[in-house]
Image: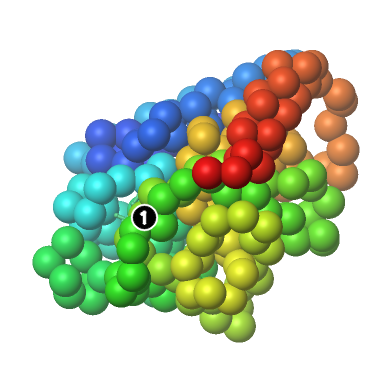
Amino acid sequence: MSDNSLRVVWVYPDLLSTYGDQGNVLVVERRARQRRLSVSRIDVRSDQPVPTSGDIYLIGGGEDRPQRLAAERLRRDGGLSRAVANGAIVFSVCAGYQILGHEFVNDLGEREAGLGLLDVVSTRGEGERCVGDVLADIDTQLRLPQLTGFENHQGITQIGPGAKPFARLRLGKGNGTGDGTEGAYNDTVFGTYMHGPVLARNPGIADLLLKLALDVNALPPADDRWYEALRAERIAAAQQPA
Ligand code: GLN
């Protein structure tokens, strides 16, 4: 953490922010402030350099063309990769998740290089688009409650040996390869297909990002009532027969 305030960087809101993914930034900021941490939020548009001294970087989902533009600019800029080399924590959703991997298939049907920050490779799924509610059990090592979110993507993602599945599916398609996995992570970089916004539905994940950034094992309790009500409603809705 640089100086006294936690630096939360929202990467490319002009290209990567679908289905309310901006909510992820708001939740991280709010959960930090509830613990009386001072936070500075830095929104980095795609024509600006990505700062390398952030503590937590958040990247959202996007349509296919903005996703390609974002990947090109992030590769050229290099700031996000340098931030990860400096130990920053990154949490990415859907298109953002695919961009952090080694490669994905772009809107032109071509293989496009990602940043290689997460050992995953994405391709275009041959079947139907993965759309709908998702429930999954987050890797037990992370000690977090059930994951709730919704997905809407054509890409599917294969995890390599350098990353672990973020969660195991109970409902939904997740990584879409049929192996029952959803998302991927390593020590500092996380990817998921979940929208929701996912951190509003799963504030425990926001707290995990804060703990990793602050290098602490625990945070003071925060008021979770609103989040719990939302979680209960969405988990019940997901379990309704179609
Ligand atoms: N364009 C990507 C896909 O369809 C990601 C979509 C998204 O971010 N919602 O796989």
Task: Judge whether residue 14 can be spotted in this image.
Answer: yes
Residue type at mark 1: give it: His
Measured from the top left, where is residue 187 in percent x and y? Answer: 67, 62
Q: What residue is drawn where x is 41% and y is 43%?
A: 60
Compared with 142, 213 (above or below) is above
> Considering depth in this image, is 115 or 158 the residue closer to the camera?
158
Q: What residue is drawn where x is 82% and y is 60%?
A: 140
Measured from the top left, where is residue 222 in percent x and y? Answer: 80, 20
The yes-or-no answer for disc 1 within 8 Å of ligand 1 is yes
Is residue 101 shown left or right of residue 189? left
Is residue 91 shown left or right of residue 212? left
Compared with 158, 193 (above or below) is above
To which residue does mark 1 refer? Answer: 153
> Considering depth in this image, is 201 or 10 the residue closer to the camera?
201
Kind of element beneath mark 1:
strand
Residue farthest bottom in this picture: 161
Task: Judge whether residue 78 can be spotted in this image.
Answer: no
- The quadrant in which the N terminus is found is top right
| Location of residue 42 (image quadrant) | top left
The residue carrying pointer 1 sits among few (fewer than 14), some (14 to 19) or many (20 or more) residues within 10 Å by Cα, namely many
Compared with 158, 60 (above or below) is above
Is residue 19 shown left or right of residue 58? left
Q: What residue is drawn where x is 53% and y is 74%?
A: 178
Measured from the top left, where is residue 62 in percent x and y? Answer: 30, 46
| Location of residue 30 (image quadrant) | top right
